[in-house]
Amino acid sequence: MTDKNTLQEKLASPCLAPLTNIEPPGFLVSANACDTHAHVIASDTATYPLTPLRSYTPAPAPEEAYLHMLDATGMTRGVLVQVSVYGTDNRYMTSILKRHPDRLRGVAVVAPTVSDQELEKLHQAGVRGVRLNVLFGGGVGFDAMETLAKRIAQLGWHMQLLLDARELPTLLPRLTALSCPIVIDHMGHMPASLGVDHDGFQALLSLVRNHQTWVKLSGAYRLSTDFDQFSDVDIFAQTLIDTAADRMLWGSDWPHVDLKDMPNTGRLLQQLARWAPDPTVRDGILVNNPARLYDFT
């Protein structure tokens, strides 16, 4: 008899590897620019095993490939987000953070029962937030939200949420009561075809306007039906920037897991010039905002 975990592992679809011929961004990237959203996946699955509860099986995306991507896109700094396929095993991510303390920060995945000692170890490694994820298997869900928010507020961390913005109207009372800043992944991860007047996107704008909420301008391909230019996402990004440019962040979402077509990471950065044509606004998104949120000095 096949147990549930083994069956889930068999169903976890394999992912494409990221492209290595990364296009240049097409504009001058300022010093201390930061890619605030990427993942690393070790080649050594014996030392760093994948959780059987995962939704997909990623191709390796190790430290050296990640650093190459940062260099190719002109990013001085980067933020690694614990990928769902490792569950709460943050070891690979933190091993990389420790080797690059001036360049990298991290967002971990932890259980609500995590010890104070472990949280302090993560902080010393460069972690500045935790992620809750209800879209991919292996993550920690929203049942842990209030408990973790109280724990991490004492460290000055934020809570990063991977969700579909259509859930936000229901979640608003809980989110607005949290004692830590909130970061929303991928512009709310809601289909762009629903438009900016949708209740979910309007709830996101309300969070941004009225509560200390940040948004990652990332993962346009996860919202779009136009895989060439992702132009249908432009109005989402531009509306968010117009609402609170000082709390917008850019992220590559490298290595672009769980996609049927692989985007060029450099072209994803080129989108930012469309969304924020003013270099001063763009520098805020790439340099100043992440420096504040992730405690870069």
Image: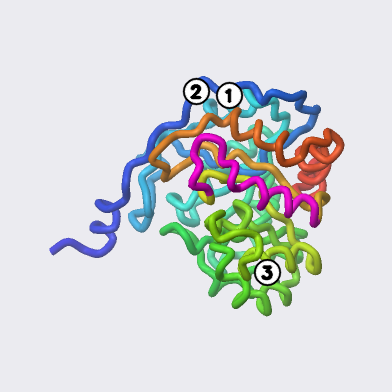
The residue range painted magenta reads 224-243
| 293 left or right of 216 in image | right
Q: Nearer the viewer, residue 32 or 204?
A: 204
| Residue 259 falls in image quadrant | top left
Q: Answer above or below: position of 216 versus 155.
A: above
Q: Are marks 3 and 1 in contact (CB under 8 Å)?
A: no
Q: Nearer the viewer, residue 261 or 239?
A: 239
User: In the rendered image, is residue 229 in sight?
Assistant: yes
Q: Earlier in the sequence, mark 3 or mark 1?
A: 1
Please give the label number shown on residue 203.
Answer: 3
Q: What secondary structure is the magenta-colored segment mainly?
A: helix
**Residue 119 percent coordinates (x, y):** 64, 58
Measured in 3D between alpha carbons, the distance from the residue under mark 3 to the one under mark 1, in whole angstroms, is 37 Å
10 Å crowding of disc 3: few (<14), some (14-19), many (20+): many
Q: Are marks 3 and 2 in contact (CB under 8 Å)?
A: no
Which residue lies under the disc numbered 1? 68
10 Å crowding of disc 2: few (<14), some (14-19), many (20+): few
Q: Quadrant of the C terminus?
A: top right
271 in the magenta segment: no
Q: Residue at x 64, y 38 (%)?
A: 98
10 Å crowding of disc 1: few (<14), some (14-19), many (20+): some
Q: Are marks 1 and 2 in contact (CB under 8 Å)?
A: yes
Q: Amino acid at mark 1?
A: His
Q: Amino acid at mark 2?
A: Thr
| Residue 146 falls in image quadrant | bottom right
Q: Residue at x 57, y 65 (%)?
A: 114
Q: Nearer the viewer, residue 4 or 281?
A: 281
**Residue 2 percent coordinates (x, y):** 17, 61
